[in-house]
Amino acid sequence: PTERKHHAIVMVRFAADCRAKMTQLTRALCTTLGPSTADLSMRFGLNSGPTTAGVLRGDKSRFQLFGDTVNTAARMESNGKPNRIQVSQKTADLIIEGGKSAWVTPREDIVSAKGKGRIRTFWVEPGTASSTGTGTPHFTATGSVTGMDDAMSIGGAGGKDGETSSRGNGSGRQRKRSSKHMKLQPKMKRLVDWNVDLLSLLLQDLMASNVEAAASSAKEHASFFSSHHTRKVGSIFSSSNHHDNTNNSDASNDMQMPREEVVDTFDMPLKAASLSQASSSSNVKIPPEVKDQLKKFVANLAFLHQSNPFHNFDHATHVAMSTRKLLSRILSPLSPEALSRHSTTAMKQNGSSSMSSSSPSSINSSTYAVTSDPLIQFALVFSALIHDADHPGVSNSTLIKEETRLASIYNNKSVAEQNSVTVAWDLFMSSDYDDLRKCMFQSSDHQLQRFRQVVVNAVMATDIFDPELKSSRESRWEKAFASSASDDAVEHEQASNLRATIVIEHLIQASDVAHTMQYWTIYEKWNHRLFKEMRAAYLAGRTKSNPADKWYEGELWFYDNYVVRRRDLQLQL
């Protein structure tokens, strides 16, 4: 090889370039693969000295480098840290001789390297990366990212004055949020950006649907609430008429509880989605002010989540991602076998023998009309994002036992879930998001009511331990899907709407525990976080049982009685 005098400096710069490219690539893949993709990182290890090079004979012949220099370089990498460049004493000396002593920082601790014993190593950070002016991210000697907008200032609605205590004695509306001075950390910013991208895609579909509906006739839309479920929604949909319970301990007397809004069934669109709608959504452009408000809303929603190990904004994002994945499986083209099966069901329900298995009407029926309503798709992902807003980090039973203020406000029922709906809806209805709501609902109270109904039903469905809600869901499922159920027992439209409501609730439930049905590393990650949260409650004296005592048995019970049940129900669909 050609000798290069400053080879150490060249290789350090190459390592920094690889790191920057890795960062760019993982961040670009966040939208496709999920926000955790950006957590992937690289370690770099460099050493200088003589090596032996050659091609080994055999089945896997390839060019290789041999010798102690290569082994030491491998130890530099394996004993390094993510996104750091670690070099040996020899390489550090060469860098200093090349006039780049400012790049070199001795590592604080001594490295114990396999086969090498205890050796002194150094961190290296090229100083030229920040002077390119390209905005390419690079890492400082402390490992933090610079050269990018890693902290985002948030303005707008941030909540009321006063702080919610860690024991859940207040409402999230009382959390002290001086959002003008709050900044998102890099990881939280990635979560926000990913959720904004996801919601933007769904918003485009919704906008295309609104345009098409307006072109045909908004008056043809069927009423969302069936006659026996119609109720007065009062002023909860008006941004200027929210109840502020900051100084009113009896606010629950004049508040409508979200749980009281839950209905057994709500009406779905009767009209099948047209093919033009799907093709036109990509041509719809979200106005800049709407996109800004959407990003501001998601960022402020992130601040509404407490820093619990499990019930936090990271978990909400994972549930939103799982919800979108399940929705995509419903909305994706069905296999020929599935189309045939579903079209047979659809023809039986519609009393027709001429319906095409691939027609919009057939697909609309087989997917319980979810394909026909982008508003419901947006509402489901929205519900996933808000379902644990301001979660206090303990169970409803603990909040009730401690006689917390939250438990009193929500009548000791679905305490955390009702509070999440309340605080998130207050934020959403703020005047800071008027353009966003107008874009979503076209100034239609009817559409806003539809949206809230789906959100309330979906979030309340995540309370899986409430006996009343559990019994109601099971009886409705039996009525809608049991083999003994007859379509003649109820009107076709009511039966279809009941199935749709059950499917929507089941989808959000499955998404909420999706980590239990994914790869082992994902399950282990979230299971460990849940254990930490429950363990913290035990050490704080808020729960009597140490989760470590029967954690294994508890996990088996949860799988047998809930996770497997969710899987079986999903197979039935």
Image: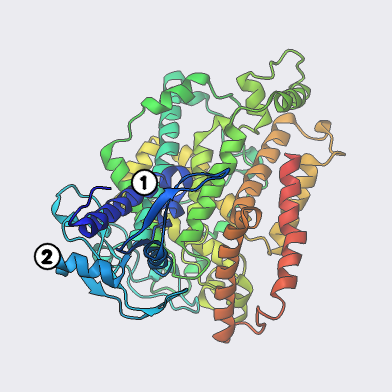
Spatial CA distance of label 1 from label 2 is 32 Å
How many residues crowd around disc 1 within 10 Å: few (fewer than 14), some, or many (20 or more)? few
What residue is at 66 percent from the left and 39 percent from the top? 500
Circle 1: residue type: Leu
Is there a contact, CB below 8 Å, between mark 1 and mark 2? no
The label nearer to you, 1 versus 2, is 2
Between 157 and 313, the one nearer to me in the picture: 313
- Secondary structure, mark 1, is helix
Image disc number at residue 436: none
Mark nearer the N terminus (1 vs 2): 1
**On screen, 52 above or below 491?**
below
Residue 321 pos. (x, y %): 51, 48
Residue 375 pos. (x, y %): 49, 37
What residue is at 39 percent from the left and 43 percent from the top? 197
What residue is at 65 percent from the left and 19 percent from the top? 358
- Secondary structure, mark 2, is loop
Return the residue at label 1: 25
**On screen, 161 above or below 430?**
below
Residue 562 pos. (x, y %): 73, 58
Q: Is residue 97 left or right of residue 445?
A: left
Between 239 and 278, the one nearer to me in the picture: 278
Between 351 and 563, the one nearer to me in the picture: 563
**On screen, 336 above or below 151?**
above
Mark yes or no: residue 326 visible. yes
Q: Pick out the residue farthest to the top.
A: 354
**On screen, 191 above or below 333?**
below
Return the residue at label 2: 99
- The quadrant of the rendering that contains the C terminus is top right
Between 90 and 38, the one nearer to me in the picture: 90
Mark yes or no: residue 452 visible. no
